[in-house]
């Protein structure tokens, strides 16, 4: 593990150190828009079988890197592995997304939750991390990840996706004591999970706070960001490749950028609604910024993709501290050729800004 | 029409004039959470039959006022009446929401669009406004409304609701010329529609920009806010009751508050993600603010509702210029008793702030 990374551009950018160009990776870069992914998933039989097989997770994690000159790999997994390991029974239904057989929807069930041991209940993820690291052969760094404590709590309490977040919001407005109990357990579980990923070989980690942006301003600070801060404080942030940077991404969190930047993270992920130029002015040199092309731009054509990507590069401007990404996960119907045009463009055009 | 309004608190607050208390009305205050609404809708046969009957629209518009001491009535109608009047053929499917028989999804169809005459193609809406005004007998002002040009365009181009906004975003990224053509027609149609509502008796108007918040920052300014500004410039803003105030509500638009406040509107509607105290500091005395209780608070109990409503009142603080509302439409499963607790509380507690 001690040979240097062949491409450490991502880690340098996250540390706001000079780089030759702006590194790029894409949220959900491995997945349904790639024919080779669909083939592997078909072989696996189901999404969950794929995610739970270290060999197949390794295969799909590397697929986009074989196709495009990306600057990072990200562990292929699901954000709900932790509650699944807590015994909630994750399953997927056609068209309805993730569901839990045993939602955490009563006080008794919340009180009964325990922090799983990642090397036991989540062993398949750690085996995946180890196998991916081996397969990567130090080409680029591997990013590990987890859902944020609040985002996990949303799914755990609702029993799946939700349009009104009735159960989780009722819990936090009406029984904040119980919500805090649940979130404290989730924070411990997420920290242990990410520490195990780091020990297994993850060189950077990211917290996906998919639903934090559905909260009111005060509730976001109290019930989501506070526990993100707890997770970050609990992380062992060193690997054989140096400090392990932490990226926090709250979808819809642009209004709260300053407080997210003060959470202890190294970088903040931004969706496409936030202007990178003003975001940079707001955070100064406290954190790096990751983002933020509208994933819908990838529905168009290579020329439009490059024009819009150029606007993102210009908005951030000169100097280090920018990791190019989409403002949200890549959409399943994205044409792979547009992804190629994007990555080639960012690799070459961004040199002007460094 | 020249007798004074019995309760003009809303109009005074929107003009940032002193009031005895903070006025309150609720987005979707007439609708599916009320048993009397469900009974009328059953009689009507369908949502569209209800919305297209001036007599039944009047009945449901007044229902929440008979139940609660609200400070405004809002026209019961659909946001998609304008594209329906353009010939797109609005219909509703169970569980999938509004759809159009003939979406505006080709250049030919966009070029063929024409501005409808509100007193002809939308006569049922104007008859509804006149009948509601008569039935209200000057108890409280009547708010008219329309979808924003961009929000209408989303539905027109997608043919209904969308999760990825692929078609509309492809149009505006790839064919901005055509998008501008469509939006300019929508802006003319919306201005004519609101002017007809004002002529028929609406004493305030609101633009619902439901989907503007899905746009990237630059695209929001270019494709949504620009056309909201055009609509406002085109409005005849006087009625027998004085100036007709305009409220602009972009869901998810908190980051763009300053530019929305500079659109020519009198008030900005805010969703629950924006802190009213900082919003007020950002806009100064340029506009009134409307909002912004999380509608999910109404899922809890009267005590929690009042506690959270108290936080909204305190966040805005002392003085005029606040219209209490939810941060989005009331949810269908809301218990009416919680709505009652909210309205009574705001009416009495807000006196402290005036």
Image: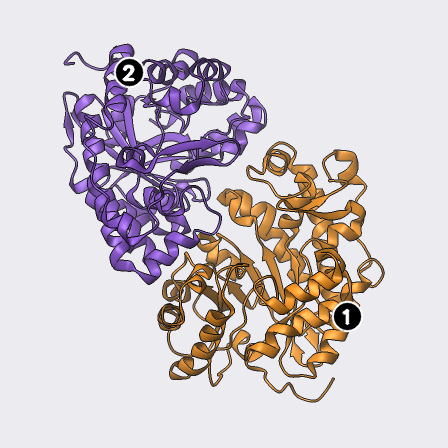
Chain colours: A orange, B purple
Q: Is residue B216 visible?
A: no
Q: Tell me the number on the disc at residue A55.
A: 1
Q: Is residue A247 left or right of residue A55?
A: left
State which chain disc 1 sits on.
Answer: A
Q: Is residue A56 above or below residue A167?
A: below
Q: Which mark is residue B244?
A: none
- Identify which residue is drawn at 48% across, 83% down: A18
Q: Where on the picture, by quarter, is residue A131?
A: bottom right
Residue B74 lies, with reference to residue B262, above or below; the image says above
Q: Position of residue A136 (x, y in %)?
A: 69, 80
* Image coordinates for residue B219, horizontal then vertical, percent: 33, 57
Q: Residue at x 59, y 84 (%)?
A: A7
Would you identify the image quadrant in which residue A15 lies? bottom right
Instruction: Identify the secondary structure beneath mark 1.
Output: helix
Q: Residues within 10 Å of mark 1 (few under 14, many from 20)?
A: some
Residue position for label 2:
B132
Q: Nearer the viewer, mark 2 or mark 1?
A: 1
Could you tell me if the residues under marks 2 and 1 are in contact, i.e. CB atoms within 8 Å? no
Query: Where does residue A292 sit, x and y in percent of width and height?
Result: 45, 64
Kindly indicate the quadrant of the structure image that contains residue B140.
top left
The N terminus of chain B sits in image quarter: top left
Residue under the point 57% across and 48% down: A211
Tell me if A192 is positioned left or right of A268 in this view.
right
> What crowding class fits label 2: few (fewer than 14 Cα within 10 Å), some (14-19), or many (20 or more)?
many
Q: Nearer the viewer, residue B22 or A289?
A: A289
Label 2, label 1: how far apart the Cα atoms are? 67 Å
């Amino acid at each position: 593990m001690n040979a240097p990374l062949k491409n450490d551009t991502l880690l340098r950018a996250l540390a706001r150190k000079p780089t030759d160009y702006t590194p790029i990776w894409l949220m959900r870069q491995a997945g349904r828009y790639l024919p080779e992914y669909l083939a592997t998933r078909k072989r696996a039989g189901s999404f969950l079988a794929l995610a739970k097989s270290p060999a197949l997770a390794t295969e799909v994690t590397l697929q986009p890197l074989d196709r495009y000159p990306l600057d990072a790999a990200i562990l292929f997994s699901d954000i709900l592995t932790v509650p699944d390991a807590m015994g909630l029974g994750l399953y997927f239904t056609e068209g309805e997304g993730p569901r839990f057989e045993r939602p955490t929807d009563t006080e008794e069930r919340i009180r009964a939750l325990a922090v799983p041991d990642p090397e036991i209940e989540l062993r398949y993820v750690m085996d995946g991390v180890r196998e991916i690291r081996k397969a990567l052969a130090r080409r680029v760094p591997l990013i590990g990840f987890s859902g944020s404590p609040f985002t996990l709590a949303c799914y755990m309490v609702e029993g799946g996706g939700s349009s009104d977040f009735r159960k989780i919001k009722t819990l936090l407005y009406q029984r904040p004591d119980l919500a805090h109990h649940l979130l404290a357990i989730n924070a411990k579980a997420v920290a242990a999970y990410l520490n195990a990923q780091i020990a297994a070989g993850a060189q950077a980690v990211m917290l996906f706070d998919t639903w934090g942006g559905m909260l009111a301003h005060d509730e976001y600070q109290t019930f989501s960001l506070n526990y993100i801060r707890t997770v970050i404080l609990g992380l062992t942030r060193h690997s054989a490749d140096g400090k392990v940077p932490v990226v926090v991404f709250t979808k819809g969190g642009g209004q709260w950028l300053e407080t997210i930047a003060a959470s202890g993270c190294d970088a903040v992920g931004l969706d496409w609604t936030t202007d990178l130029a003003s975001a940079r002015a707001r955070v100064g040199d406290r954190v790096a910024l990751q983002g933020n092309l509208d994933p819908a731009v990838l529905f168009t054509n290579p020329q439009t993709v490059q024009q819009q990507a150029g606007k993102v590069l210009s908005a951030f401007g000169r100097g280090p501290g920018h990791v190019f990404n989409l403002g949200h996960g890549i959409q399943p119907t994205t044409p792979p050729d547009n992804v190629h045009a994007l990555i080639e463009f960012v690799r070459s055009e961004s040199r002007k800004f460094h």
